[in-house]
């Protein structure tokens, strides 16, 4: 009986060490998964806010351009819209460069 006990004790020790190692590995993987998930949520929320702001900015710009150009004859209306759009896109490019 002492042979069985002496044999199972090192085996039991190895088994418990292996279980502990797997538990620690799972804990670390869970922690890393949580970090990645939180980072993804932060990026997703930031992108959603950017899209919302960009849409509001486009609507505001369209209203401003329409107000500036509304009383002009058709040829001057097209020129007014084009020049205002060019100015808007130039401002957007500058803002994007500053954000980068």
Image: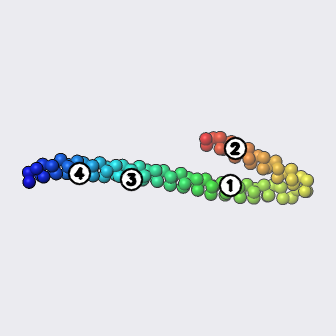
Residues at badges 2 and 1 in contact (C-beta under 8 Å)? no
Q: CA distance from mark 2 to mark 1?
A: 14 Å
Single out the mark in the foreground, 2 or 4.
Answer: 4
Q: Is residue 95 above or below residue 51?
A: above
**What residue is shown at x 20% (from left), y 49% (from top)?**
11
The chosen color scheme is rainbow
Q: Which residue is mark 4?
A: 16
Q: Which residue is mark 3?
A: 30
Using a 10 Å C-alpha cutoff, classify the residue at mark 2 as few (fewer than 14 neighbours), some (14 to 19) or many (20 or more): few
- The reply, left or right, for residue 59 in relation to residue 2 is right
Q: CA distance from mark 2 to mark 4?
A: 61 Å
Q: CA distance from mark 2 to mark 3?
A: 41 Å
Single out the mark in the foreground, 2 or 3.
Answer: 3
Circle nearer the N terminus (2, 1): 1
Q: Is residue 96 above or below residue 41?
A: above
Where residue 18 appears, as percent x and y from the top left, is 27, 49
Q: Secondary structure at mark 3?
A: helix
Single out the mark in the foreground, 3 or 1.
Answer: 3
Q: CA distance from mark 3 to mark 1?
A: 40 Å
Where residue 15 appears, as percent x and y from the top left, is 24, 51
Q: How many marks do you count on the picture?
A: 4
Q: Which residue is mark 2?
A: 93
Where residue 27 appears, as percent x and y from the top left, is 34, 52
- The reply, left or right, for residue 60 in relation to residue 44 is right
**What residue is shown at x 73% (from left), y 54% (from top)?**
61
The one nearer the camera, 37 or 54, is 37
Q: Which residue is mark 1?
A: 57
Where residue 85 appears, as percent x and y from the top left, is 78, 50
Q: CA distance from mark 3 to mark 4?
A: 21 Å
Circle nearer the N terminus (2, 3): 3
């Amino acid at each position: 009986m002492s042979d069985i006990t002496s044999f199972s004790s090192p085996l039991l020790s190895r088994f418990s060490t292996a279980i502990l190692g797997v538990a620690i590995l799972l804990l670390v993987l869970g922690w890393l998964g949580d970090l990645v998930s939180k980072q993804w949520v932060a990026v997703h929320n930031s992108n959603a806010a950017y899209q919302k702001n960009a849409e509001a900015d486009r609507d505001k710009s369209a209203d401003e351009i329409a107000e500036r150009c509304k009383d002009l004859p058709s040829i001057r209306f097209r020129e007014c819209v084009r020049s205002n759009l060019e100015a808007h896109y130039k401002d957007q490019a500058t803002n994007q460069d500053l954000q980068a």
